[in-house]
Image (cartoon, rainbow, N blue to C red):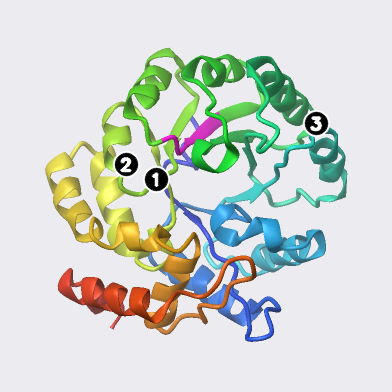
Amino acid sequence: MDTKFHGVGVAIVTPFNADHSIDFDGFGRIVQHISDGGVRYIVLQGTTGESPTVTKQEKAQLLQYLKENNPKNLPIVFGVGGNVTADVVSGMKSIDFEGVDAILSVCPYYNKPGKRGVIEHFTRVADASPVPVILYNIPFRTGINMSAETICELAQHPNIIGVKEASCVIEQCMEIARDKPDDFLLISGDDVQGVPIISIGGVGVMSVIANAFPAKFTGLIDAALKGDFAFARTELGHFLRIDPLLYEEGNPVGVKSILEILGLISSEVRLPLMKASDDLVERQRAVLQRDGLLELVA
Protein backbone atom coordinates (compact mmCIF):
# COMPACT_ATOMS: atom_id res chain seq x y z
CA MET A 1 0.00 0.00 0.00
CA ASP A 2 1.19 3.52 -0.83
CA THR A 3 1.74 5.28 2.51
CA LYS A 4 2.41 8.84 1.30
CA PHE A 5 -0.96 9.93 2.72
CA HIS A 6 -0.57 8.15 6.05
CA GLY A 7 -0.14 10.31 9.14
CA VAL A 8 -0.80 14.05 9.28
CA GLY A 9 -1.52 16.17 6.25
CA VAL A 10 -2.02 19.87 6.89
CA ALA A 11 -5.00 21.68 5.42
CA ILE A 12 -2.85 24.76 4.98
CA VAL A 13 -4.15 28.29 5.52
CA THR A 14 -3.90 31.06 2.94
CA PRO A 15 -2.30 34.10 4.65
CA PHE A 16 -3.43 37.56 3.58
CA ASN A 17 -1.92 41.01 3.84
CA ALA A 18 -3.81 43.97 5.31
CA ASP A 19 -5.20 44.75 1.84
CA HIS A 20 -6.34 41.11 1.55
CA SER A 21 -3.87 40.23 -1.17
CA ILE A 22 -2.11 36.91 -0.65
CA ASP A 23 0.88 37.07 1.68
CA PHE A 24 3.25 34.71 -0.09
CA ASP A 25 6.05 35.34 2.43
CA GLY A 26 3.68 34.31 5.21
CA PHE A 27 2.60 31.29 3.21
CA GLY A 28 6.25 30.30 2.88
CA ARG A 29 6.71 30.61 6.65
CA ILE A 30 3.80 28.27 7.27
CA VAL A 31 5.15 25.76 4.73
CA GLN A 32 8.54 25.83 6.47
CA HIS A 33 6.93 25.60 9.92
CA ILE A 34 4.83 22.55 9.12
CA SER A 35 7.65 20.90 7.17
CA ASP A 36 9.99 21.31 10.15
CA GLY A 37 7.23 19.85 12.31
CA GLY A 38 7.29 16.54 10.45
CA VAL A 39 3.93 16.52 8.69
CA ARG A 40 3.58 14.02 5.86
CA TYR A 41 1.83 16.05 3.15
CA ILE A 42 0.18 19.39 2.39
CA VAL A 43 -3.45 19.94 1.43
CA LEU A 44 -3.71 23.14 -0.60
CA GLN A 45 -6.93 25.07 -1.15
CA GLY A 46 -9.35 23.15 0.98
CA THR A 47 -11.81 24.69 3.43
CA THR A 48 -9.03 25.96 5.70
CA GLY A 49 -7.36 27.62 2.71
CA GLU A 50 -10.51 29.74 2.15
CA SER A 51 -10.94 28.25 -1.30
CA PRO A 52 -14.35 29.87 -1.96
CA THR A 53 -12.81 33.37 -1.80
CA VAL A 54 -9.53 32.60 -3.59
CA THR A 55 -9.63 33.18 -7.35
CA LYS A 56 -8.63 30.60 -9.94
CA GLN A 57 -5.55 32.70 -10.79
CA GLU A 58 -4.56 32.95 -7.12
CA LYS A 59 -4.97 29.20 -6.68
CA ALA A 60 -2.61 28.62 -9.60
CA GLN A 61 -0.12 31.06 -8.07
CA LEU A 62 -0.27 29.34 -4.68
CA LEU A 63 0.21 25.94 -6.29
CA GLN A 64 3.20 27.15 -8.28
CA TYR A 65 4.70 28.82 -5.22
CA LEU A 66 4.33 25.62 -3.20
CA LYS A 67 5.95 23.54 -5.92
CA GLU A 68 8.93 25.92 -5.91
CA ASN A 69 9.08 26.34 -2.13
CA ASN A 70 8.55 22.87 -0.71
CA PRO A 71 11.70 22.31 1.38
CA LYS A 72 11.04 18.65 2.15
CA ASN A 73 9.31 17.86 -1.15
CA LEU A 74 6.14 16.87 0.67
CA PRO A 75 3.32 15.36 -1.38
CA ILE A 76 0.72 17.92 -2.47
CA VAL A 77 -3.05 17.39 -2.42
CA PHE A 78 -4.84 20.14 -4.33
CA GLY A 79 -8.46 21.09 -3.74
CA VAL A 80 -10.53 20.67 -6.91
CA GLY A 81 -14.26 20.58 -6.36
CA GLY A 82 -17.58 22.28 -6.86
CA ASN A 83 -21.29 21.74 -7.32
CA VAL A 84 -21.35 22.02 -11.12
CA THR A 85 -19.91 18.77 -12.45
CA ALA A 86 -19.18 20.11 -15.93
CA ASP A 87 -17.27 23.07 -14.48
CA VAL A 88 -15.16 20.84 -12.22
CA VAL A 89 -14.27 18.57 -15.13
CA SER A 90 -13.52 21.38 -17.58
CA GLY A 91 -11.66 23.38 -14.94
CA MET A 92 -9.10 20.62 -14.53
CA LYS A 93 -7.87 21.26 -18.07
CA SER A 94 -6.31 24.55 -16.96
CA ILE A 95 -4.50 23.14 -13.91
CA ASP A 96 -0.81 22.26 -14.09
CA PHE A 97 -0.85 18.88 -12.36
CA GLU A 98 2.90 18.34 -12.53
CA GLY A 99 4.02 17.86 -8.94
CA VAL A 100 0.47 17.30 -7.66
CA ASP A 101 0.02 13.90 -6.02
CA ALA A 102 -3.77 13.86 -5.65
CA ILE A 103 -6.82 16.10 -5.64
CA LEU A 104 -9.29 16.55 -2.80
CA SER A 105 -12.81 16.89 -4.17
CA VAL A 106 -15.72 17.92 -1.98
CA CYS A 107 -19.17 16.41 -2.24
CA PRO A 108 -21.37 18.76 -4.32
CA TYR A 109 -22.96 21.32 -2.03
CA TYR A 110 -26.22 23.28 -2.04
CA ASN A 111 -27.94 21.35 -4.84
CA LYS A 112 -28.03 18.27 -2.53
CA PRO A 113 -27.90 15.44 -5.12
CA GLY A 114 -29.07 11.96 -4.28
CA LYS A 115 -26.85 8.88 -4.28
CA ARG A 116 -27.01 8.40 -8.05
CA GLY A 117 -26.04 12.01 -8.67
CA VAL A 118 -23.13 11.86 -6.22
CA ILE A 119 -21.79 8.70 -7.82
CA GLU A 120 -22.11 10.09 -11.34
CA HIS A 121 -20.45 13.37 -10.30
CA PHE A 122 -17.42 11.71 -8.76
CA THR A 123 -17.16 9.12 -11.52
CA ARG A 124 -16.85 11.90 -14.08
CA VAL A 125 -14.36 13.80 -11.91
CA ALA A 126 -12.25 10.68 -11.38
CA ASP A 127 -12.37 9.78 -15.07
CA ALA A 128 -11.14 13.26 -15.99
CA SER A 129 -8.49 13.69 -13.30
CA PRO A 130 -4.88 12.92 -14.29
CA VAL A 131 -4.06 12.26 -10.62
CA PRO A 132 -5.79 10.19 -7.92
CA VAL A 133 -8.91 11.55 -6.24
CA ILE A 134 -9.63 11.75 -2.51
CA LEU A 135 -13.31 12.26 -1.73
CA TYR A 136 -14.28 14.89 0.85
CA ASN A 137 -17.37 14.25 2.96
CA ILE A 138 -18.27 17.24 5.12
CA PRO A 139 -22.06 17.23 5.46
CA PHE A 140 -22.44 20.19 7.82
CA ARG A 141 -21.03 22.37 5.01
CA THR A 142 -22.46 20.65 1.93
CA GLY A 143 -25.95 19.86 3.17
CA ILE A 144 -25.71 16.15 2.36
CA ASN A 145 -23.91 13.21 3.89
CA MET A 146 -22.25 10.68 1.61
CA SER A 147 -23.22 7.39 3.19
CA ALA A 148 -20.73 4.63 3.86
CA GLU A 149 -22.44 2.64 1.10
CA THR A 150 -21.94 5.46 -1.41
CA ILE A 151 -18.31 6.00 -0.41
CA CYS A 152 -17.49 2.30 -0.65
CA GLU A 153 -19.18 2.05 -4.04
CA LEU A 154 -17.07 4.96 -5.28
CA ALA A 155 -14.01 3.28 -3.77
CA GLN A 156 -14.23 0.68 -6.54
CA HIS A 157 -13.19 3.33 -9.09
CA PRO A 158 -9.49 2.82 -9.86
CA ASN A 159 -8.72 6.55 -9.60
CA ILE A 160 -10.53 7.16 -6.29
CA ILE A 161 -8.06 6.28 -3.54
CA GLY A 162 -9.58 7.55 -0.32
CA VAL A 163 -11.97 9.74 1.61
CA LYS A 164 -11.52 12.64 3.99
CA GLU A 165 -14.30 11.80 6.42
CA ALA A 166 -15.63 14.81 8.35
CA SER A 167 -19.13 13.59 9.11
CA CYS A 168 -18.02 13.18 12.74
CA VAL A 169 -20.22 10.08 12.89
CA ILE A 170 -18.00 7.30 14.20
CA GLU A 171 -20.52 4.59 13.25
CA GLN A 172 -20.30 5.69 9.62
CA CYS A 173 -16.50 5.60 9.77
CA MET A 174 -16.69 2.07 11.18
CA GLU A 175 -18.92 1.01 8.28
CA ILE A 176 -16.47 2.48 5.78
CA ALA A 177 -13.55 0.73 7.48
CA ARG A 178 -15.45 -2.57 7.40
CA ASP A 179 -16.59 -2.43 3.78
CA LYS A 180 -13.89 -0.51 1.91
CA PRO A 181 -11.20 -2.11 -0.28
CA ASP A 182 -8.01 -2.82 1.66
CA ASP A 183 -6.02 -0.12 -0.13
CA PHE A 184 -8.69 2.59 0.17
CA LEU A 185 -7.63 5.38 2.53
CA LEU A 186 -9.92 6.38 5.40
CA ILE A 187 -8.64 9.78 6.55
CA SER A 188 -10.15 11.77 9.39
CA GLY A 189 -11.26 15.29 8.51
CA ASP A 190 -11.54 16.21 12.17
CA ASP A 191 -8.52 16.65 14.45
CA VAL A 192 -10.12 15.31 17.63
CA GLN A 193 -11.58 12.27 15.87
CA GLY A 194 -8.24 11.33 14.33
CA VAL A 195 -7.21 8.92 17.09
CA PRO A 196 -10.54 7.06 17.29
CA ILE A 197 -10.71 6.78 13.51
CA ILE A 198 -7.18 5.36 13.40
CA SER A 199 -8.24 2.82 16.03
CA ILE A 200 -10.85 1.42 13.62
CA GLY A 201 -8.64 1.36 10.53
CA GLY A 202 -8.03 4.96 9.50
CA VAL A 203 -4.62 6.06 8.26
CA GLY A 204 -4.35 9.61 9.56
CA VAL A 205 -5.79 13.12 9.62
CA MET A 206 -6.07 16.11 7.32
CA SER A 207 -5.48 18.57 10.11
CA VAL A 208 -6.29 22.19 10.91
CA ILE A 209 -4.48 22.52 14.25
CA ALA A 210 -1.23 21.18 12.75
CA ASN A 211 -0.87 24.54 10.97
CA ALA A 212 0.08 25.84 14.41
CA PHE A 213 1.45 22.82 16.30
CA PRO A 214 2.69 20.37 13.67
CA ALA A 215 5.27 18.48 15.70
CA LYS A 216 3.08 17.78 18.72
CA PHE A 217 0.05 16.80 16.66
CA THR A 218 2.08 14.67 14.26
CA GLY A 219 3.67 12.93 17.24
CA LEU A 220 0.37 11.83 18.70
CA ILE A 221 -1.06 10.68 15.36
CA ASP A 222 2.11 8.73 14.58
CA ALA A 223 1.86 7.12 18.02
CA ALA A 224 -1.71 6.06 17.30
CA LEU A 225 -0.66 4.58 13.97
CA LYS A 226 1.95 2.53 15.84
CA GLY A 227 -0.69 1.31 18.30
CA ASP A 228 0.37 3.45 21.26
CA PHE A 229 -3.09 4.74 22.02
CA ALA A 230 -2.32 5.52 25.65
CA PHE A 231 0.27 8.12 24.60
CA ALA A 232 -1.94 9.39 21.78
CA ARG A 233 -4.92 9.91 24.11
CA THR A 234 -2.78 11.75 26.65
CA GLU A 235 -1.30 14.05 24.02
CA LEU A 236 -4.68 14.63 22.40
CA GLY A 237 -5.87 15.95 25.75
CA HIS A 238 -3.71 19.04 25.21
CA PHE A 239 -5.86 19.95 22.19
CA LEU A 240 -9.36 19.26 23.49
CA ARG A 241 -9.93 22.72 24.97
CA ILE A 242 -8.48 24.67 22.05
CA ASP A 243 -10.23 22.66 19.32
CA PRO A 244 -13.72 24.21 19.67
CA LEU A 245 -12.13 27.67 19.70
CA LEU A 246 -10.87 27.00 16.16
CA TYR A 247 -14.42 26.94 14.82
CA GLU A 248 -16.48 29.18 17.09
CA GLU A 249 -16.35 32.10 14.64
CA GLY A 250 -15.70 30.05 11.50
CA ASN A 251 -12.79 28.18 9.96
CA PRO A 252 -10.01 29.30 9.41
CA VAL A 253 -10.76 32.33 11.62
CA GLY A 254 -9.74 30.48 14.77
CA VAL A 255 -6.54 28.88 13.54
CA LYS A 256 -5.41 32.10 11.85
CA SER A 257 -5.90 33.88 15.17
CA ILE A 258 -3.64 31.32 16.84
CA LEU A 259 -1.06 31.66 14.08
CA GLU A 260 -1.01 35.41 14.71
CA ILE A 261 -0.61 34.81 18.45
CA LEU A 262 2.38 32.62 17.58
CA GLY A 263 3.82 35.39 15.39
CA LEU A 264 3.71 33.42 12.13
CA ILE A 265 1.17 35.33 10.02
CA SER A 266 -1.54 37.95 10.21
CA SER A 267 -5.01 36.71 11.11
CA GLU A 268 -6.61 38.51 8.13
CA VAL A 269 -9.42 36.64 6.37
CA ARG A 270 -11.62 37.53 3.42
CA LEU A 271 -15.29 38.44 3.72
CA PRO A 272 -17.76 37.09 4.51
CA LEU A 273 -15.45 35.77 7.25
CA MET A 274 -14.09 38.30 9.72
CA LYS A 275 -11.05 38.30 11.98
CA ALA A 276 -11.46 36.73 15.40
CA SER A 277 -13.10 38.91 18.01
CA ASP A 278 -11.00 40.25 20.88
CA ASP A 279 -12.96 38.00 23.23
CA LEU A 280 -12.11 34.87 21.24
CA VAL A 281 -8.43 35.84 20.98
CA GLU A 282 -8.14 36.31 24.73
CA ARG A 283 -9.84 32.98 25.44
CA GLN A 284 -7.51 31.30 22.97
CA ARG A 285 -4.48 32.82 24.70
CA ALA A 286 -5.70 31.59 28.07
CA VAL A 287 -6.29 28.04 26.83
CA LEU A 288 -2.97 27.87 24.96
CA GLN A 289 -1.18 29.04 28.10
CA ARG A 290 -3.09 26.64 30.35
CA ASP A 291 -2.38 23.62 28.18
CA GLY A 292 1.29 24.42 27.58
CA LEU A 293 0.93 24.90 23.84
CA LEU A 294 2.56 28.33 23.70
CA GLU A 295 5.77 26.79 25.01
CA LEU A 296 6.02 24.63 21.89
CA VAL A 297 6.88 27.57 19.66
CA ALA A 298 8.51 29.92 22.16
Q: Is 96 included in the stretch rendered in magenta? A: no
Q: CA distance from mark 1 to mark 3?
A: 28 Å
Q: Position of residue 59 (x, y in %)?
A: 73, 61
Left/right placement of residue 120 relative to residue 207 reads: right
Disc number for residue 193? 2
Please tell me which residue is depicted at 60% across the width and 68% down the height of the picture.
Answer: 14
Question: Are the residues at dot 2 and dot 1 in contact (C-beta closer than 8 Å)?
Answer: yes
Residue 118 in the image: above or below residue 237: above
Left/right placement of residue 253 relative to residue 109 reads: left
Q: Secondary structure at mark 1?
A: loop
Please tell me which residue is depicted at 23% across the width and 60% down the height of the picture.
Answer: 241
Location of residue 193 by image quarter: top left
Q: Which residue is mark 3?
A: 128
Q: CA distance from mark 2 to mark 1?
A: 5 Å
Location of residue 242 by image quarter: bottom left
Which label sits in the foreground, 1 or 3?
1
Pick the front one: 23 or 204: 23
Task: Provide the residue span drawn in magenta.
Answer: 162-167
Q: Which residue is mark 1?
A: 190
**Label 2 packing within 10 angstroms: few (<14), some (14-19), many (20+):** some
Q: Secondary structure at mark 2?
A: loop
Q: CA distance from mark 3 to mark 2?
A: 32 Å
Please tell me which residue is depicted at 33% across the width and 23% down the height of the picture.
Answer: 171
| Sequence-wise first label, 3 or 2 | 3
